[in-house]
Image (tube, grey):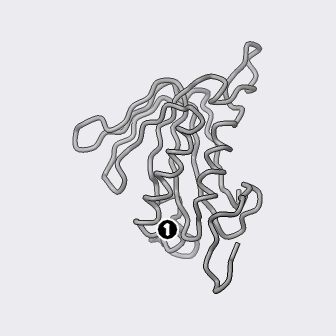
Amino acid sequence: MPSVGGARDDSHSFRFEDSLTANMRAVVQRVSRARVIVEGRVAGEIGTGLLILLGVGRDDISAVAASMAEKVVNLRIFEDAQGKMNRSLLETRGSALVVSQFTLYGDARGQRRPSYIAAAPPERAKALYEEFSAALRGFGVNVATGIFQAMMSVELVNEGPVTILLDSGRTF
């Protein structure tokens, strides 16, 4: 919410459903294993859990990162004993591999070369990417990450397959 002088106030309580301009995006994939390789070395690796490709928007704030992390850890996309998707990452004690993905903001409506104007600048995106990862850890989740702004190779085994798109502004 804007405060006096038009500055954004990050101290207020933010709900996932409240955002119109702060649109953090995530592609969440249920995996049996995933890893990120940078320059021939494994930068991050997990077994069962979630691969999260995270895009940070230009207007995102700290509260959005925390809210998105809470949404992700509570998504009921793991199977229960009856084979229904009824369990969350927290309930399964799975891990998370978080990979920064500014290209989630690629807008190709009307041109062939995507525009990334809606993506956060690198410094801000890195800070919120790290805050999102820290928020997941705060829920007790084992978190591995890629390397911000590096050329990465992502390998995964998507179970189901289950892939969920999240946008804090609910545009999809």
Q: How many marks?
A: 1
In the image, residue 136 sits, relative to residue 25, either above or below, namely: above
User: Which quadrant: the C terminus?
Assistant: bottom right
Say which residue appears at 49% left-offset and 68% top-offset. Answer: 120
Question: Quarter holding the N terminus?
Answer: bottom right
* Residue in front for this viewpoint, 11 or 145: 11
Is residue 50 rendered to the left or right of residue 5? left
Q: Tell me if 155 is positioned left or right of 11 in this view.
A: left
Residue 81 placement (x, y as % from top left): 73, 13
Residue at screen point 67% across, 57% down: 168
Residue 42, by quadrant, is top left
Looking at this view, name the residue that lies furthest to the bottom: 5
Q: Label 1 sits on what residue type?
A: Ala
Could you say whether the residue bearing mark 1 is in a helix, strand or loop?
Answer: loop
Residue 149 in the figure: left or right of residue 83? left
Front one among 88 and 162: 88
Q: Is residue 139 above or below residue 48?
A: below
Residue 154 position, x and y percent, is: 39, 40
Could you say which quadrant of the image residue 92 lies in?
top right
Residue lying at 39% horizontally and 34% vertically, measured from the top left: 35
Question: Badge 1: few (under 14), some or many (20 or more) residues near its Cα, within 10 Å?
Answer: many
- The image position of residue 91, as x and y in percent, is 67, 24
Q: Residue furthest top?
A: 81
Q: Which residue is mark 1?
A: 120
Residue at image point 44% right, 46% down? 99
Image location (x, y in percent) of residue 73: 64, 37
